[in-house]
Image (spheres, rainbow, N blue to C red):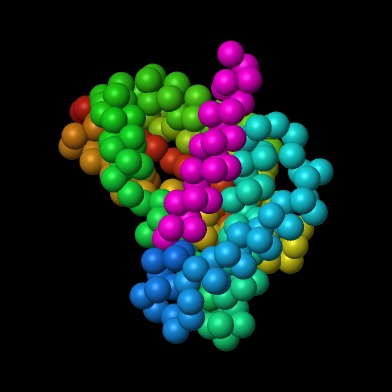
Amino acid sequence: MSELGDFIKHYMFGHQAPSQFMNGLKSEIKDSLEVDADTVVDSIKKEAKEIEKQNESSIVDAPSHGHLELCSSVMSAYNNLLPEIGDKDKTVEFISKAMMKGVNNLSMRTSLSLMLDACKNNPDRLRDIFSWLMKQYGATFGWTAEHTESDEEDSFAIEIEKCYYFNFFSSHDVAFLTPILCQLDSIWFEMVDPKKHGFTFDKSRYQTQGYGAPKCVFPIVVKKKDAQ
């Protein structure tokens, strides 16, 4: 059972995400660049495998193997596309758009919708599910679940002190690539409907290491009925 769980985690983080990213990347290259998309994507995949091999020491569990594959794909995409695009910021923007195009699909949105619906008007289940999700990220993510309550609101926040993505890119002096993955948070928190689900994602308190914060904070707020 443990081996099956490890396989699922590796598949989720390591095969599915990079595969979706590559699909988005190929589509974006075909639409926007005057190069052969298949040739460029093949080069990106080849270099990504080399980056993975050079960083095997960062693999400590099944999820971290998956995290390495995804980060290697992003880093390789940057290395290969920068000479074609010719500008650092435009290259990051291009890869960011490709990542969203690949990952923000019907399957992803349906899964998130079901998860959010399961938490409807149930703060305890909300905390349990989000804590369980964070555990799936494995040992290379260090996090805590913070719960605060006042007369106006019941707040729950996942706070991440250690992030594999940020640490990996920082170790290669390309920390500016981290937001390419941070942006994926928006897929789920933009799906939160306060009227439907009974809670909200407080964007004003949201922060990530990729955008320069000392830690990542994902704040979810349940308003008290008498304060609504």
Q: Is residue 189 left or right of residue 44?
A: left
Q: Quadrant of residue 64?
A: top right
| Residue at 41% over, 33% down | 155
* Residue 49 at x, y percent in the picture: 69, 55
- x and y, in percent, of residue 205 in the image: 45, 49
Asked if residue 150 is positioned above or below residue 173 in the image, the reply reads: above
Q: Quadrant of residue 198?
A: top left
Q: Position of residue 175 (x, y in %)?
A: 66, 63
Q: Residue at x 62, y 54 (%)?
A: 71
Q: Nearer the viewer, residue 114 or 7?
A: 7
- Location of residue 171 in the rendering, given as x and y in whole percent from the top left corner: 76, 58
Q: Number of marks in the image? A: 0
Is residue 160 located in the magenta-colored stretch of the structure?
no
Q: Is residue 129 visible?
A: yes
Quarter the N terminus occupies:
top right
Q: Nearer the viewer, residue 13 or 120?
A: 13
Q: Which residues are magenta?
A: 1-24
The residue positioned 66% from the left and 61% from the top of the image is: 46
Q: Residue furthest top?
A: 1
Q: Nearer the viewer, residue 227 or 88?
A: 88
| Quadrant position of the C terminus in the picture | top left
> Does the image show residue 217?
no
* Residue 12 forms part of the magenta stretch: yes
Q: Secondary structure of the magenta portion, mostly?
A: helix
Residue 40 versus residue 183: which sits nearer the camera? 40
Q: Is residue 221 left or right of residue 95?
A: left
Picture quadrant of residue 84 = bottom right
Query: Would residue 21 appear left or right of 47 to someone viewing this image?
Result: left
User: In the displayed structure, would residue 187 be above or below residue 160?
Assistant: below
Please name the residue shown 62% across and 67% down the image: 43
